[in-house]
Amino acid sequence: MAKRIIGWAYAAVLLVFFVSTTVFAVANLVGVTSVRGDSLSGLAWALLILNVAAPVIALLAALLLGRKRGGGSKLLLLTAALCAVAVVQLDVFHLLFPIEQIGYLFQ
């Protein structure tokens, strides 16, 4: 019984992380378009949309891949999907805002 409760709690925390990454990606999309709206290239738009879609796609892929597996395997797949989303979002951030543009924040 305790294993099931811990498993469900871990899954709930992961779901909160997926929701928060989606919310942050939407906020990034709104913020970037309000600041640089007309000057965004097609690639920038594609990266921003990928940034929003990545958590949803990764969550659905992890749930589909873990459909017939045990609880531990599902949690491992969800964790790997969340890590992949983090990598994609960091890459998009660094492609849109090179370190030279945000370097003044650390001086």
Image: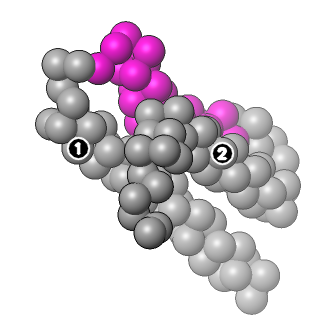
Quadrant (top left, top right, bottom left, bottom right) of the N terminus = bottom right
* Residue 98: % across, % down: 50, 39
Residue 68 falls in which quadrant of the image? top right
Q: Which residue is painted at 76% across and 43% down in the image? A: 66
Give the magenta-colored segment's residue range. Answer: 40-62
Q: Which residue is painted at 60% across and 77% down in the image? A: 9
Q: Dot 2 surroundings within 10 Å: few (below 14), some, or many (20 or more)?
A: few
Residue 55 highlighted magenta (yes or no): yes
* Residue 2: % across, % down: 74, 88
Label located before the other in sequence (2 or 1): 1
Q: Dot 1 surroundings within 10 Å: few (below 14), some, or many (20 or more)?
A: few
**Magenta-highlighted stretch: main secondary structure?**
helix
Can you see residue 74? no
Can you see residue 17? yes
Identify which amino acid the numbered label 2 is placed on.
Val
Q: Which residue lies under the disc numbered 1?
A: 31
Image height of 57 relative to 78, above or below? above
Q: Which residue lies under the disc numbered 2?
A: 87
Give the Cα distance between marks 2 and 1: 20 Å
Element type at mark 1: helix
Residue 77 highlighted magenta (yes or no): no
Image height of 81 relative to 56, above or below? below
Tally the numbered discs.
Answer: 2
* Residue 70: % across, % down: 84, 56
Identify which amino acid the numbered label 1 is placed on.
Gly
Q: Which residue is painted at 26% across and 38% down in the image? A: 32
* Residue 42: % across, % down: 37, 11
Image height of 32 relative to 10, above or below? above
